[in-house]
Amino acid sequence: MASSVTDRQVRISRIAGRYLVFDIDDVVHIRRHHSICAVFTGTMPQNPTQNVFLGLPIELYAQEAKILVDKKAGYIVDDAADHLTQLKTMDESSRKEYIQSLKVQRKNAQLVFEEAKALSQARHQDKRKATSGSKKARETNNPAPPATVEQEDTLFDTQPVKPAPAAAAVAAVKDTMPALTPTTSSTLIVPQTSSTPVEVPSSFPLQAYLNSRGYFITPGLRFGGDFSVYPGDPLRYHAHYLATSYEWEKKIPLLDLLTSGRLGTAVKKSFLLGGQQPQDQVAESEKVAAGGDDVRVFCIEWAGM
């Protein structure tokens, strides 16, 4: 099990300058094993304007994509160019195999759709039976007075419709099954090991440092910093740190320390600041933290006045 986690590489599609992950298994993997949440950006085909519960794909920040690449846990591809290249170089047997894989996916989705439809119809018929049975029981307990005028059957005095067998329900919807659009093209694209370069901001070393220690990181603009740092999944924990990155030689105004420290304390977080030491100073300095890291971090808590 450990080897499969270590060997797994996530395909990151770069489309129009954005880094997207389409496979739900990859989304679960990077969240569970690499402390990366990212952001859902997709909408449902039935409701393309909805913006409350978004779905696949997820969008990674450039820093998150680079973290996965540096860990050898992912690779980045230019999706549009890669698809065209594969389609142009595909031989006839590979093309038939890809088309067959799409048909298999459609068939599997169709079976699921048909089973769900049949179960829904069966539940609806059972509900109608239960309603009809309770109505007859009430009429038995409270018989109506004899009618003086002969009553005629009405449109609503029909017998309950018998539940349609599952096979009939399946046949009824077989011809109305919508076309299938796969969420990924993994059967078309071959796995790769090389990645395109990623441009990242100057705050990347601090983010990579925190990620390597198992912290979950989200944007921290709403708290006045670069990052919000969580000790575990943000669905379960509150952020413990408000983090801001500084360049190694940059002078930090005292007012920044005061305002960030007080703001962090006000939202029940410690103010964390850090930066990366230049590579030419790492070997000479004695200030590098244990383990050979070239990033130093400090925490400030506002204790009182």
Image (cartoon, grey):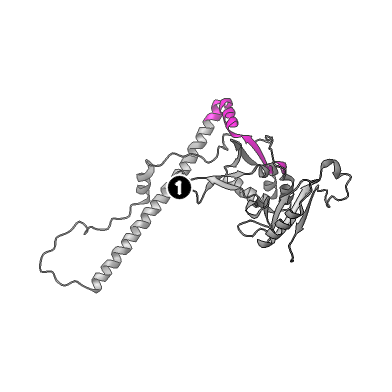
Q: Position of residue 286 (x, y in %)?
A: 88, 50
Q: Residue furthest bottom?
A: 141
Between residues 231 and 239, which one lies in front from this camera angle? 239
Does residue 24 appear left or right of residue 231 in this picture?
Answer: left
Does residue 252 appear left or right of residue 14 in this picture?
Answer: right
Total labels drawn: 1
Between residues 291 and 264, which one lies in front from this camera angle? 264
**Numbered range of the magenta stretch:** 68-95
Q: Position of residue 259 (x, y in %)?
A: 71, 57
- Is residue 72 magenta-colored? yes
Residue at 10% over, 66% down: 149
Above or below for 107 versus 33: above
Q: Position of residue 203 (x, y in %)?
A: 72, 45
Among the 4 quarters of the image, the one containing residue 26: top right
Mark 1 lies on residue: 112
Q: Main secondary structure of the magenta part?
A: helix
Between residues 180 and 162, which one lies in front from this camera angle? 180
Above or below for 8 versus 119: above
Amino acid type, mark 1: Val
Q: Position of residue 40 (x, y in %)?
A: 56, 47
Among the 4 quarters of the image, the one containing residue 179: top left
- Element marked by disc 1: helix
Between residues 303 and 297, which one lies in front from this camera angle? 303
For the C terminus, give its image quadrant: bottom right
Residue at 62% over, 56% down: 234
Residue at 53% over, 47% down: 55
Q: Residues within 10 Å of mark 1 (few under 14, many from 20)?
A: few
